[in-house]
Image (tube, rainbow, N blue to C red):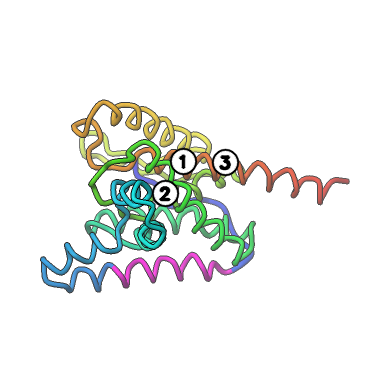
C-alpha cells in the first residue's frame, strides 16, 4: 500500500516543508560522499545512542548529558540508506504541506522538531541501555501524521496497491490509511520488546511516541480552531 498523493489543497506555499526536505537530502548527499569509515564515525557522532545518554546520567556528567541530548536533534537529519531517506521525505511532503498550512510556518517547524525530540525520548524509555545508534526523521514525521490524522481525517489519499504485480489505484480516507499504519507500528512495537529479531532495526516506539504527540496537538488545535470560527 503505497501513498502517492493526497487530495487536500493548501492556501500557503509549504516553504518549511520544502526546506526540511532539502536539508535532509543535502546532509544525506554529504554523508554518502564520505569514505566508509568516516560515514560510520559521522553517524555514531551525530546519531542518538540511548545507552550513551544513560551512561552520562549515571556518571552525573552534565556536559556529556548535554552532548547526548544534542544528538537527539542532529539524529533527526541523518538517514541510513537512500530508501530510508525517500520514504521519510515522501511522507513529509505528502502530509507536511497541509499541516504547515494549518499551523503556520514557524509553529509547524517548532512542532516538527518537538515531535522528533519526544519520539526519541519515548524510544529511549524503552531502550535505556541500547548501544544501537538511532537516526532518521521518522519520529518527527510520525508527529506530522498524527496531527494530520486529527485535522484532515477525511482527506482522500491516492494509494497504489500491487496485486500479483498488477497496479491498482484507489482513494482511501486519511483516517483509514494512517490508522492502519499506526496499528502496524503498535503491533511491531510490542513484538520488538521480545528481542531484536522482532524489531527489524526500526525504532517503532519512536514512531508511536511521535504519532501520539501529534494526535494530542491536533486535538488541542482543532478545539481552538472550532471555537475561533464558531457561529
Q: SS at mark 3?
A: helix
Of all residues, the one furthest to the front in this rendering is 60
Q: Which residue is mark 2?
A: 139
The x, y position of residue 54, in whole percent, is 34, 46
Closer to the chain start, of discs 1 and 3, is 1
Instruction: Find residue 216 and report its image quarter.
Output: top right
Identify which residue is drawn at 62% across, 45% down: 218
In the image, 56 versus 23, the foreground residue is: 56
Q: Which residue is mark 3?
A: 215
Q: SS at mark 2?
A: helix
Q: Is residue 132 left or right of residue 141?
A: left
Q: Badge 2: how crowded within 10 Å, few (<14), some, or many (20+)?
A: many
Q: Decide: marks 2, 1 in contact (CB < 8 A)?
A: yes
For the record, the magenta segment spans 13-27
Give the vertical position of 39 relative to 219 (above or below): below
Q: Is residue 112 left or right of residue 21?
A: right
Closer to the chain start, of discs 3 and 2, is 2
Amino acid at each position: 500500500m503505497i501513498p502517492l498523493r493526497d487530495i487536500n489543497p493548501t492556501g500557503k506555499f509549504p516553504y518549511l516543508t520544502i526546506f526540511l526536505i532539502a536539508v535532509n537530502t543535502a546532509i544525506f548527499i554529504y554523508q554518502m560522499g564520505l569514505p566508509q569509515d568516516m560515514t560510520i564515525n559521522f553517524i555514531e557522532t551525530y546519531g542518538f545512542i540511548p545507552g550513551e545518554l544513560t551512561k552520562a546520567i549515571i556518571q552525573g556528567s552534565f556536559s556529556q548529558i548535554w552532548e547526548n541530548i544534542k544528538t537527539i536533534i542532529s539524529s533527526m537529519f541523518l538517514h541510513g540508506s537512500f530508501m530510508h531517506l525517500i520514504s521519510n521525505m515522501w511522507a513529509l511532503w505528502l502530509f507536511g504541506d497541509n499541516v504547515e498550512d494549518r499551523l503556520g510556518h514557524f509553529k509547524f517547524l517548532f512542532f516538527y522538531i518537538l515531535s522528533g525530540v519526544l519520539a526519541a525520548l519515548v524510544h529511549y524509555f524503552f531502550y535505556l541501555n541500547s548501544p544501537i545508534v538511532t537516526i532518521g526523521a521518522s519520529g518527527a514525521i510520525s508527529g506530522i501524521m498524527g496531527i494530520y490524522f486529527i485535522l484532515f481525517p477525511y482527506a482522500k489519499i491516492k494509494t497504489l496497491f500491487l496485486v500479483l504485480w498488477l497496479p491498482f489505484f484507489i482513494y482511501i480516507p486519511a483516517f483509514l490509511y494512517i490508522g492502519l499504519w499506526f496499528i502496524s507500528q503498535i503491533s511491531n512495537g510490542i513484538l520488538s520488546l521480545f528481542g531484536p529479531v522482532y524489531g527489524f532495526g526500526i525504532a517503532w516506539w519512536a514512531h508511536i511516541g511521535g504519532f501520539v504527540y501529534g494526535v494530542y496537538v491536533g486535538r488541542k488545535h482543532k478545539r481552538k480552531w472550532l471555537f475561533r470560527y464558531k457561529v
